Image (cartoon, rainbow, N blue to C red):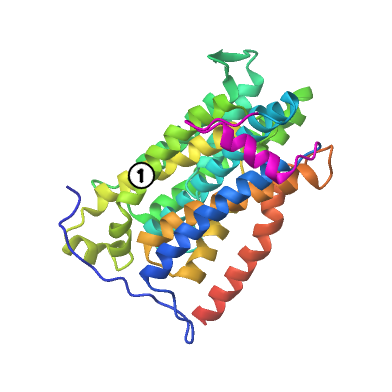
Amino acid sequence: MLSQQIEIPVMDKQPKGLLYPKWRSRIIAIIGLLALLLLVIVFATSIGSVEIPFGTTLTILVSKLPFINITPSWDDNIETIVWAIRLPRVILAGLVGAALALAGATYQGLFRNPLADPYLIGVAQGAALGAVIGFLIPVSGVGMGIGLVPVLAFVGALLSVTVVYLIARVGKTVPVTTLILAGVALGALLGAIVAYLAITSGQLLHGIMFWLAGSFSLSQWLEVKIVLPVIAAGAILILLFSRMLNIMQLDEEQAQQLGINVERLKIFLLAAATMVTAAAVSFVGIIGFVGIITPHAVRLIWGPDYRFLLPLSLISGAIFLILADVLARTLVAPSEIPIGVITALCGAPFFLYLLRRRAKMLF
C-alpha cells in the first residue's frame, strides 16, 4: 500500500475570472474527446495520395469489427490501403501521442513543474544513443520482424533513466532538483556522443537524422502490437495514482504526513512514465513538445485535477499527434516532413507563450 485512503479535495488554482468546469463537465469532455478521436482516426485514414471517401473508409473499418458482416462494394486495393497501410500508422501515431502527453503530465505533477516534459531526465538522449548504435551495427534485426534500432532505443532509454536515478539517489531519498540536474547533465553527455557518432556515420547519416526527427512512414501492425501492451500497462499504472499526484502538489512533507510513501510513489511513477515514453520513441524516433503543450492545453481548459488531467491529456495527445502526422505526410506530398518538425513548429510558439506567462505570474 502506498497510502491510506484519504480524501483530499483538489483546490483549482486559476486566474481571476476563469472558472474551470466541474467534474460532470469533465466527464462529458472525456466522452466527447473519445468520440472526436474516433472521427479523427477515420479522417486520417481517408487522407493520402489516394483519396478515399470518408464513408468508404468508415464502412471498411466497421466491417472489420466482430459480428458485423458487410458485403464489400469497394476494390480490394482500397481495403489494403486502408487496413494494412494507413490504419496501423494512424493507430501508432495515436498511441505515441497518448503516451507522450500522459508521461508529460505525470512528470509535471511529480516534479511540480509545469515546464517538465517526458524527456527531462534523459529518455530521449538514451533512446537516441541506442538507436544510433543500432544503425551502426551491421545486423538487420533481432527476430520476429523486429529491427535492432527500436530494441536498442528502448533499452537505451531505460538504462539512461536508471543511471540518472542512481546518481540522484541520496540514501533512501531522491531529491527532485538533483534528479533533474542529473538528467540534464547525462543528457548533455549522451547528446554529445550521439552527435559524434552521427557525424562519423558516413552514408548512414541521413537515416539517423530522419529517425532523430521522428517519422511514422514505416509503421506496421507488428509495431502496434508491440507498443500497445507496454503503453497500456504504464498508462493504467499512472492513472491508478492520479489522486496521489493531486496530494503531491501540496508538498512532499505534507504528502508524507497524509500517508503517502513519497519515495516509493516516485519510483512507481518514474518507472511507468519512462516505460511508456521509451516504448513511444523506440519505433518512431524523438518527437518533441507533445508532452509539454498537450497537458498545458488541457490544464488551461479543464483545470489541474489529475484525476481528469491525465485521461484528458492522454486522449488529446492522441488526437494532436494523429493530426500532426496528417500534415507531415500531406503538406509536401509525395515527400514527407519528419513529424518532429511539425510538432516543433506547433509547440515552440506555445512553449514561449508559457514561459512568458509564467514570468509575468512570478513578477
Residue 222 falls in which quadrant of the image? top right
Q: Nearer the viewer, residue 340 or 310?
A: 310
The residue sitting at 27% across, 62% down in the picture is 252
- Where does the image place residue 32, in percent across and percent down from the top left? 50, 60
Q: Is residue 283 left or right of residue 299?
A: right
Visible in this render: residue 167? no
What is the span of residues highlighted in magenta in the rendered image?
50-71
Say which residue label 1 marks.
236
Q: Whole-percent x and y of residue 254? A: 22, 67
User: Quick one: SS at disc 1?
Assistant: helix
Residue 186 locus on image (x, y percent) = 50, 42
Q: Is residue 301 above or below residue 342?
A: below
The residue at 33%/66% (across/down) is 249
Q: What's the residue type where badge 1 is placed?
A: Ile
Q: Nearer the viewer, residue 186 or 264?
A: 264
Q: Which residue is outermost to the bottom?
A: 17
Above or below, comparing residue 255 to residue 165 in the picture: below
Query: In front here: 354 or 199?
Result: 354
Task: Report if residue 64 lies within the magenta region.
Answer: yes
User: In the rendering, at what x and y percent does residue 17 appear?
Assistant: 49, 87
